[in-house]
Amino acid sequence: MTPQLRCGPSILIVGLILGLAAPSSLVAADRAATYAQDSSATVSPLRDSLQAITSDELFSKLLEHNRLRDARLQRYAAVRTYALKDVEGKIRANATVAVHYTAPETKEFKTTSEGGSWVIRSLVFKRLLESETEAATGQQRRDSSIKPANYTFRLIGEQDVGPYHCIVAEAVPKRRDKYLFEGRIWIDSQDFAVVKISGHPAKKLSFWINRADFVRQYQKIGEFWLPRRDETFVEVKLYGKKRLTIDHEDYTINQSVGNDQAQGIVHDEVITR
């Protein structure tokens, strides 16, 4: 089976906000300058050692990296921190969620703490987890995978993202679909893993959505590249701007979950496949 790299919660977040962005909604998300900065930041021409690579070869190397990762990554646990802030930076709601993944597609979520608006926590955070579970189990049949059937890469140059030296490509969707994105993708020049994705939906989401941008960043932990941070910025008519962030931390990888810990996961707050 072809390995599939998705934008994960980034596209799900935008789609969820679309569902909430009616006049009766209390939720919007903040558009900041992050995407604009990514798009205008200086990108250096490819060095001699990288000039020979084509966009098709880059895509092939990315897919091969994903295939090897999927074969080796049997399980992980992590902690996510969700926060929705208004344009002044005030937190409207937050939640901490323990995540357990077991290959090939099982995810379990447990909310360990939460605060702020009950409406936001219920309509945004909980529904995000439900949507992610549905996507993993195939209940959402929108194919947002980063693969040649959905995207074309256009090489732009190279750029450092934190400690990682990356090849930068424009990701061009092959159809106008709100579950696909258009923007840029940063791929590590050594591992050919995705380091960052920045963009917006390939199709206008709604009359109510003036703008929707997202940035997803990855980190290397041992031999694996895993999500580090999601930011979604949306400007909604009548409700203005807010920002939704998800920080991914405290990973443990390929370690067995003890019986007591596993039993602690399965209770009323858990969403699983």
Image (cartoon, helix red, strand yellow):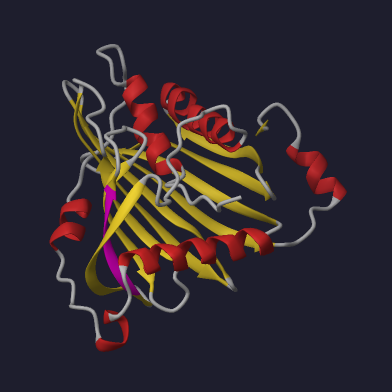
Residue 65, compared with residue 271, is above or below; it is: below
- Looking at the image, the residue that sits furthest to the bottom is 48
Report the side of 64 relative to 200 (left or right): right
Residue 14, compared with residue 26, is above or below; it is: below
Q: Is residue 241 in view from this perspective? A: yes
Quarter of the picture containing the C terminus is top right
Q: Nearer the viewer, residue 273 or 140?
A: 140
Tell whether position 227 is magenta: no
Q: Residue at x 84, y 53 (%)?
A: 258
Report the side of 96 relative to 229 (left or right): right
Tell whether position 171 is magenta: yes
Q: Residue at x 27, y 34 (%)?
A: 176
Q: Where in the figure is residue 137, as x and y percent of width and height?
A: 62, 34
Q: Main secondary structure of the magenta part?
A: strand
Report the side of 151 relative to 261 (left or right): left
Residue 69, compared with residue 51, is above or below; it is: above
Q: Where in the figure is residue 23, as x and y percent of width and height?
A: 24, 13
Q: Residue at x 45, y 23 (%)?
A: 123
- Give the quadrant of residue 178: top left
Q: How many marks?
A: 0
Q: Where in the figure is residue 210, as x and y percent of width and height?
A: 16, 30
- Looking at the image, the residue that sits furthest to the right is 259
Specify start and end residues of the magenta stretch as a single range. 166-172
Report the side of 270 relative to 87 (left or right): right
- Give the quadrant of residue 204: top left
Q: Is residue 193 in view from this perspective? A: no
